[in-house]
Image: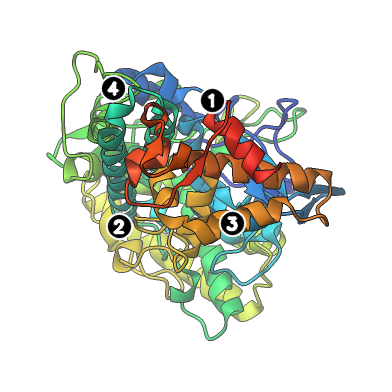
Amino acid sequence: MRRALLLTLLAAPAFGFESVCYDSANHYCSPAAGPNTARNRRVGNLDEHRQLFVTTLQKAGLPSSLSAPQTLDVYTSSSTVTIGSAVVPTLQPAPFEEATRVATRTFTAPELAQLPDFSYALWDWASGHEICPEMDVIDPVLCHDFASHMGPVNSNHFAPQTQQFYARYHQRALDRAAECKTMATALAPSGGRFDDDLKACEVEALSLEAVGQHFLQDAWSMGHMWQRWGSPNLSEFPGATIDEKRDRAVLTALVSGFIHGARGVLQALPNWTTYDVNDAMCAPWPEVRFVGDDGTISRGVGDDYLGELTPIQSQRLFDCATSGVLEVYQATGKVSGPASPEAGLETVDPTGPGCFGQRATNEAIVRGMEIDLKVLGLQNSIALDARFASWMLPQVARASGKVPVDNHTKNEFRLSLMRVTTLARVAAKDDPNGTTLANGGLGDFMGVLPNGQYANPGGYEDPSLPWGSVSNANGLTLARAFHRAHASDWCAALGQPQLDALKAHAADVSLDTQGKAAACAICTELASRQLRVGTSASQYDSSKEPLCGYLDPSGTFLYLSGTGTPTELAAQWCCP
């Protein structure tokens, strides 16, 4: 059994509530990290984060169009990326005047609630997972591998960092929503001609909220209601070198993951076994309980048990989630339609203690310090500090986490493991319903402090708004990918020199067929937004006022006369 168990531990680790990536054949993505996951969807079995956000939108009564599939036409370069044995086009948005390809990105806002388990941020997804943010490798697959790189810095998926990360993303969503409202006000006289651009803005605002709600959802998963150790920044881990820092980050993440509950990993055991992994803290064991911010003690479940959410978990989670979504949508122009929340919801502060103050009891944490499984119907438990487990985890760190784990580090690991498990058992015996351990009472692990001691945001986080500035590279990536939603930014940014550059690029005789088509398409798209049908500022058809005429009346305009729609005239100007 030990050999089978060790082999299975080398699989991908569990997330907070389950997140999955499926390819077009409805198989698990392979490779399961990096550029491949940016090119596939997150809809299928066990997509718990997506399901939660879908339910949130339904309970909030938002128009169904906001959760429908969306398509982005992203203008890219001719660069390629290798995925396995295949060479595929890049997804990284290019400067518009250099674009030579068009990538079609299809997604739904609810899918992006799973994004933090695959991407460092929304801009990372928009870049196709082709860049390694702040990490110690350049291989984009390894950089996005959960076991070796993303998992070690996912302390922001555990209390109390979940609250900080959600609050920042919620604010970004509100800021984007306010920009959508400004656009809607400016475009009101257009008679609805540009509603698609406004709806694109609303979807982007809800996409930011979806990314943020991943952390809110995690806050209500039992396995996340405690302070695991570590920072969202690898640089803040102890160690003289980056390798030493990652050794500790990987080992810390492994221990945290097994306390959290390892069903997502171990239930993938070979079909010929009779094992049923039912270990806490996420499983519905009697000892698995949490204390709410009001002092009430309740049963709870977590990852892979979404269908067994307790009534109090479900009510409070959706009160918080719907309050957040409604705050964002109400701040937009609501061009997609009115919101009709279902009865029975309570409006709360989605960033406050009522949504993030819950903590696992001392008894629940000790229950989580075991690997629990049934074999031939008999319950078995392996304590994390048992001889086998304390030997096994460094082996997993070496194989799956891709760290060397020298003998000195192994010994330090075992001593730390014995210390925290002993401390936990004493605390659970003295005060089983207390939350000392969940609030950082476990102390450090291998010199890594509880995550409440690290207040800095991840260096890879999405930037604050506004986006579109040349000095804000990640924001510019997002403004290019969601360019229709950012029409106001591009109306202000594109003067005559930029429009002439788009036209000149489309006329470049060195472009291949695809490059010519892409250059013409983006030139036409942007020029049509600034094209007035007429000969001058005093003589043009005001009934065909372009998008930028409403969003940036003092900006630059093209004046072209002729027959056809503004888009047709723009196409003739760009590619005569």
For residue 527, side relative to residue 40 (left or right): left
Q: Earlier in the sequence, mark 2 or mark 3?
A: 2
Report the residue marked by disc 3.
500
Mark 4, secondary structure of its residue: helix
Real-space Cα distance between discs 2 and 3?
73 Å
At label 3, the amino acid type is Asp
What amino acid type is highlighted by mark number 2?
Answer: Val
Choose between 272 and 64: the one closer to the eye.
64
Q: Residue at x 69, y 47 (%)?
A: 519
**C-alpha separation, residue under disc 1 versus residue under disc 2:** 52 Å
Are there few (<14), some (14-19), or many (20+) residues within 10 Å of tag 3?
some
Q: Which disc is residue 223 wearing?
A: none
Residue 216 visible? The answer is no
Residue 361 image position (x, y, % from top left): 27, 45
Horizontal side, residue 156 vs residue 508: left or right = left
Q: How far, Cα to Cα, is label 1 from label 3?
A: 34 Å
58 up-or-down from 110: above or below: above
Instruction: Spot the residue most to the right.
Output: 85
Lower sequence index among marks 1 and 2: 1
Residue that extends furthest to the top in the rendered view of this protein: 343
Nearest the eye: 114 or 203: 203
Instruction: Using a 10 Å C-alpha cutoff, classify the residue at mark 4 as few (fewer than 14 neighbours), some (14 to 19) or many (20 or more).
Output: many
Residue topped by disc 1? 69
